[in-house]
Image (cartoon, rainbow, N blue to C red):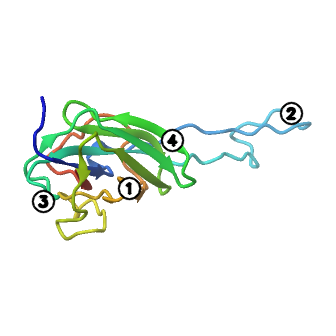
Amino acid sequence: MGWTLPYQLGIHLLGDPLWGQGYSTDVASVAATGNGPVGSSDPCVAFTPVVPKVSIGDYVWYGINRNGLQDDNSPASGVTVTLKDEAGSDVGTAVTNADGYYWFTDLVGGAAYTLVFTAPDGYSWTTKDAGGVSDNNLVTDTNDSDVTPTDGMIAFTAPLDGDNVGGAPVSPTTPPWTADW
């Protein structure tokens, strides 16, 4: 389908109470040398805590009316999204599905990340935070574009807890963070 107008795309970042709560139950046990086997009942056994893993993801849409808000909601499929860690190294790449959703799993809760969205040829980013809320809070920043128009990026801190599953959210009508083309 060909577009004749210079449409914009929107991206909304979900941080992710809608997708559940995921924790790893892996535990690393320690064995001593020279003193025989060490078991979990021994008083000096050390166990390494495992940091909970979480997932993030959300929705990319065409902002046909170019206002930076999710009010015309035309899903943008096939958009490439790259996840980078705090050092700028690529962690993963996703492509939005037919409904405009993307997601990443196994993020470290509380760690800093950046999402980089690659706009399709002929598209530009719309106004950031057009809804007047810029805190990327899951409750208050719910329906506008959060991507920086100059570079197609969203910097964020992964939630400390939540789901660690992939797939579109269970309740796609209330996505928490957004960005718009």
Q: Quadrant of the N terminus?
A: top left
Q: Secondary structure at mark 1?
A: loop
Q: In screen coordinates, is 66 left or right of 50? A: left
Labels 3 and 2 touching (C-beta < 8 A): no
Q: Which mark is residue 163?
A: none
The 10 Å Cα crowd at callout 1, few under 14, some 14 to 19, many 20 or more, is few
Amino acid at the residue labelled 4 = Val
Labels 4 and 2 touching (C-beta < 8 A): no
Give the spatial CA distance, label 4 vs label 2: 41 Å
Labels 2 and 1 touching (C-beta < 8 A): no
Q: Which mark is first along the chain, 3 or 4?
A: 3
How many callouts does the rendering have? 4
Give the spatial CA distance, label 4 vs label 1: 18 Å
Q: Is residue 100 above or below residue 129?
A: above
Q: Which mark is first along the chain, 2 or 4?
A: 2
The 10 Å Cα crowd at callout 3, few under 14, some 14 to 19, many 20 or more, is many
Q: Is residue 107 visible?
A: yes
Q: Which mark is residue 91?
A: 4
Amino acid at the residue labelled 1 = Asp
Give the spatial CA distance, label 2 vs label 1: 58 Å
The 10 Å Cα crowd at callout 2, few under 14, some 14 to 19, many 20 or more, is few
Q: Residue under circle 1?
A: 151
Where residue 80 appears, as percent x and y from the top left, is 35, 37
Q: Residue under circle 3?
A: 67
Give the spatial CA distance, label 1 vs label 3: 19 Å
Q: In screen coordinates, is 9 left or right of 115? A: left
Q: Which mark is first along the chain, 1 or 4?
A: 4
Amino acid at the residue labelled 2 = Gly
Q: Secondary structure at mark 4?
A: strand
Q: Which mark is first along the chain, 3 or 1?
A: 3
Q: Residue under circle 2?
A: 36
Q: Secondary structure at mark 2?
A: loop
